[in-house]
Image (tube, rainbow, N blue to C red):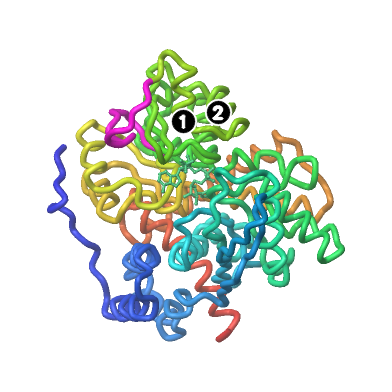
């Protein structure tokens, strides 16, 4: 089926939603990704607001779009040569109606307030969808770890937490990892927090190491969860993952474990990428080699191709040019545009499951919808990561540790329930169970809105 960008029909917006969107744009100029995320959610809410005028009266939309608190702070640190650097730190505590603020930290030179606000806003609906009693927050810094020594990364993390610690707490705000923040960075932050507060407060961070109050399956959870969500979507059309060919973008935490789970379930992942280019490997990506290159050696993806005769490293075009049956975009926001979507549709793609946060542009999403491609938005498809963080918090609170099998099976069950809840809401409000974009936004929104109503004007 050929779908042109000109075929896209935008969702109709009510006057109330149009007014709120205008105000959001006016009050946060220049924050395009935040506006995009807000518009994606609000544009689906018309039928809910019609049935529930009390949400409009209580100004739930206006309150949802305004973080409860947002922090920006100086992060000074000294490099190995004695030179002083100053980065900027962020934490946006978006909504605590369902539980303590919860969401990751991203260290990347592109991080700015708008990026963190977009990620924090997404987290509201994602965390609500998990049903795990967690509020929403996000943070990070424009610090860039690659090329920095271990000692420099440790000093940066310590300086970052020396300011942020006063806002954290197992009942208040609980960060985790995100782009370029993994167990190493979280370890340095946890150590500094513990030193400052003089308490081993295990539940203050998630994504910790297994040996120091971390949870089994947390590292794998986001990627595995995105594949479980994909499997559930395909099942609604009587299909399974066996024998399919997949493309995964990125080659970091989410991508690696999406590839691992896809292979386990019978799908061959033939391509993945990093910001330098992409690898095509018709024999299927060798996950052990990818882990060695990316997790152990922290090297670039071309080193994977250099070590694998069946692989080709490509720097022209995009990983989404590779023909496949299913796609898991697992790198970063807006990496898959409408021209990529058109190519994938031409190649007959069946389903897209977003491992990353908002990796598909609004026009790409609309093209997939018009073409009947199953599309799992990140707030549902990648919620396995934060859901397993909530399982880590449960284990920390009970001072216990579940087996890998126990945690992994809870993750699988949670993803199944998120999928079912998303479809139920899509069917009820959008009258189309395949409208996962509406189902995820509404499924999360109703839970948060009801809690906000019950808790009064705060
Ligand atoms: P990692 O840092 O482990 O990996 C990120 C990958 O994406 C790397 O391969 C990186 O390539 C690539 N990438 C990052 N920025 C860009 C860019 N601007 N252009 C092209 N490629 C880029 O991060 P994660 O795997 O943890 O996160 C990936 C996505 O998943 C993010 O959107 C994150 O918000 C989302 N997510 C993560 C969760 C988690 O549990 N970690 C939970 C839910 C969502 P390079 O190394 O060259 O930069």
Q: Label 1's element?
A: loop
Q: Which residue is mark 2?
A: 293
Q: Is residue 136 visible?
A: no
Instruction: Give the farthest residue toward the top.
Output: 309
Q: Position of residue 16 (x, y in %)?
A: 31, 80
From this viewpoint, which residue is outermost toward the right? 198
Question: Which label is found at residue 301?
Answer: 1
Q: Residue 438 vs residue 182: left or right?
A: left
Q: Quadrant of residue 77?
A: bottom right
Task: Point out the stretch of residues depicted in magenta.
Answer: 312-328
Magenta span includes 322: yes
Q: Position of residue 421 (x, y in %)?
A: 48, 53
Left or right side of 150 for 97: left
Describe residue 15's horizontal placement relative to residue 228 as left or right.
Answer: left
Report if the beta carbon of the residue with label 1 is closer than 8 angstroms to ligand 1: yes
Q: CA distance from mark 2 to mark 1?
A: 7 Å
Point 54% across, 37% down: residue: 224
Residue 23 drawn above or below residue 360: below
Whether residue 454 is visible here, answered yes or no, is yes
Q: Nearer the viewer, residue 336 or 223?
A: 336
């Amino acid at each position: 089926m050929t779908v042109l960008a000109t075929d896209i029909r935008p969702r109709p917006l009510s006057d109330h939603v149009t007014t709120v969107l205008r105000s959001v744009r006016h009050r946060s100029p220049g924050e395009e990704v935040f506006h995009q995320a807000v518009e994606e959610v609000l544009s689906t809410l018309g039928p809910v607001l019609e049935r529930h005028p009390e949400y409009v009266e209580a100004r739930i939309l206006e309150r949802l779009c305004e973080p409860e608190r947002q922090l920006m702070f100086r992060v000074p640190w000294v490099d190995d040569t004695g030179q002083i650097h100053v980065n900027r730190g962020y934490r946006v505590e978006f909504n605590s109606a369902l539980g303590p603020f919860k969401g990751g930290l991203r260290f990347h030179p592109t991080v700015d307030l708008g990026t963190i606000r977009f990620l924090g806003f997404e987290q509201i609906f994602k965390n609500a969808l998990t049903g795990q009693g967690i509020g929403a927050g996000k943070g990070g810094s424009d610090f860039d770890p690659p090329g920095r020594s271990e000692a420099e990364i440790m000093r940066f993390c310590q300086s970052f937490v020396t300011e942020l610690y006063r806002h954290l707490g197992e009942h208040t705000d609980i960060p985790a990892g995100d782009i370029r923040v993994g167990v190493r960075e979280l370890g340095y932050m946890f150590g500094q927090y513990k030193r400052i507060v003089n308490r081993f407060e295990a539940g203050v961070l998630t994504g910790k190491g297994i040996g120091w109050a971390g949870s089994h399956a947390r590292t794998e959870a986001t990627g595995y969860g995105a594949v479980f969500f994909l499997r559930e979507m395909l099942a609604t059309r009587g299909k399974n993952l066996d024998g399919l060919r997949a493309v995964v973008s990125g080659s970091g935490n989410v991508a690696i474990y999406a590839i691992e789970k896809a292979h386990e379930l019978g799908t061959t992942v033939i391509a993945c990428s990093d910001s330098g280019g992409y690898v095509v490997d018709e024999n299927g990506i060798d996950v052990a080699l990818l882990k060695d290159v990316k997790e152990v050696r922290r090297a670039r993806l071309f080193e994977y191709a250099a070590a694998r005769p069946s692989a080709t490293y490509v720097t022209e075009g995009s990983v989404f040019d590779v023909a496949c049956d299913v796609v898991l975009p697992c790198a970063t926001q807006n990496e898959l545009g409408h021209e990529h979507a058109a190519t994938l549709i031409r190649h007959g793609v069946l389903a897209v499951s977003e491992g990353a946060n908002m990796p598909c542009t609004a026009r790409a999403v609309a093209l997939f919808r018009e073409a009947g491609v199953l599309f799992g938005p990140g707030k549902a498809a990648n919620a396995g990561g934060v859901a397993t963080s909530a399982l880590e918090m449960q284990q920390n609170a009970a001072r216990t540790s579940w087996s890998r099998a126990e945690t992994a099976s809870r993750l699988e069950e949670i993803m199944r329930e998120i999928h079912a809840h998303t479809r139920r809401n899509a069917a009820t409000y959008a009258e189309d169970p395949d409208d996962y974009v509406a189902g995820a936004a509404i499924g999360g929104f109703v839970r948060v809105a009801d809690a906000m109503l019950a808790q009064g004007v705060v």
